[in-house]
Amino acid sequence: MFSLREVAKTYPNATIALESVTAGFEPGEFVALLGPSGCGKSTLLRLLAGLEEPSAGRIEWDKAARPGPGDIGFVFQDATLLPWATAADNVYLPLRLRGRTRDEAAPLVTAALAQVGLSDFAQVKPRGLSGGMRMRVSIARALVSDPMLLLMDEPFAALDEFTRHKLQDDLHALWRRSGKTIVFVTHSIYEAAYLANRILVLSPRPGRVAADLRPAIPEGPHRRSSGAYTDLVAEITDTFKRVMPEHD
C-alpha cells in the first residue's frame, strides 16, 4: 500500500524524532506503532497523514493506493469534538467541509454512528456523553468518509481500564469486519499485542524500527487469555529490554 524509505524527522530545535525508518505497509493490516514516550510514534503518524514532511527519506504510495480527499482518517488522543454540536453534527463535520449537503451526508453519518454503537445518541451533545462515548464519536467522524487508511494516535490512553477493553474489542471487531488498514500508536505492550496483526517496535529517540513482529493469536472471546497472547507480551517485553538504554 505504501512504504517508508529511510524516513527521518528533525525539528527546528534540533530534536531528532525519527532516523532511518524503513518499513512497508500492506492493505488490510492492523499495525501497532509501539514504543516509549518521545520515540517519534506520533511524529510518524503525522508524516503518514501529510500533516508534516520528512526531513529526509520519502513515503512512497502504490499508484492504486495514493490517497485523495477523505482517504485518510485520523483519530487523535483527545476526542476534540465541537462542544455545541450534537454527535451527528460532529460526525458530519468532515463531509460538510468538503461541500456535502446535510441531506447527502445523513445516511453516511447514520452508518458511521451505527458502526461504533451510538445510533441512539446521534442528537446528544458531548457534555451528555461519557469519555468512551466521546471517543466513539471521534472514531465515527474518522470513518464517515470511508477512508482506506485509519490513523489512530493513542485514542484510548485516557480511558479507564474497563472502557479501554471494551473499545479495544469493538475496534478489533470493526477492523475484522471492514478490512481497513489501521496504523495505531500506543505505548502499551498489552494493547498492541491484543489489537494488531503486526507490531513495529520503535527504539527510544531517535526512533528507529527495532523489531517487526507478526503475531499469530487466535480470534475469539479468549484472545487475551491465550497462550499465544502471553508469549507475545513476553517477546515484546524482551525486545524492549534489548533496545532500551541501560541506566546505572
Image: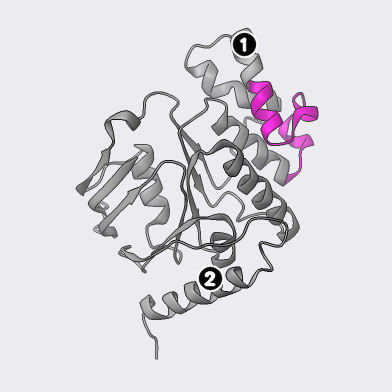
Q: Secondary structure at mark 2?
A: helix
Q: Hey, which quadrant is residue 126 in on the image? A: top right
Answer few, some or many: residues within 10 Å of disc 2's Cα (few below 14, many 20 plus, some between 14 and 19): many
Is 119 in the magenta? yes
In the depicted view, which residue is nearer to us: 64 or 58?
64
Residue 68 in percent (x, y) is at 37, 25
* Quarter of the image with the C terminus in it: bottom left
What label does residue 102 carry, if any? 1
Q: Does residue 85 appear in the picture of this structure?
A: no
In the depicted view, which residue is nearer to us: 168 or 128?
168
Mark 2 vs mark 1: which is more N-terminal?
1
What label does residue 232 carry, if any? 2
**Residue at 59% over, 9% down:** 104
Q: Does residue 123 appear in the picture of this structure?
A: yes
Answer few, some or many: residues within 10 Å of disc 1's Cα (few below 14, many 20 plus, some between 14 and 19): some
**Residue at 58% over, 45% down:** 78
Q: Secondary structure at mark 1?
A: helix
Tell me where the magenta segment starts and ends, as one range: 109-131
**Residue at 57% over, 9% down:** 101
- Front: mark 2 or 1: 2
Question: On the picture, is 212 further left or further right than 174?
Answer: left
In the depicted view, which residue is nearer to us: 26 or 102?
26
Q: Hey, which quadrant is residue 219 in on the image? A: bottom right
Q: Is residue 208 above or below residue 72?
A: below
Residue 33 in percent (x, y) is at 44, 57
* Quarter of the image with the N terminus in it: top left
Question: On the picture, is 176 further left or further right than 70?
Answer: right
Identify residue type, mark 2. Leu
Residue 2 in percent (x, y) is at 32, 42
The Cα–Cα distance between marks 2 and 1, rounded to whole angstroms, is 46 Å
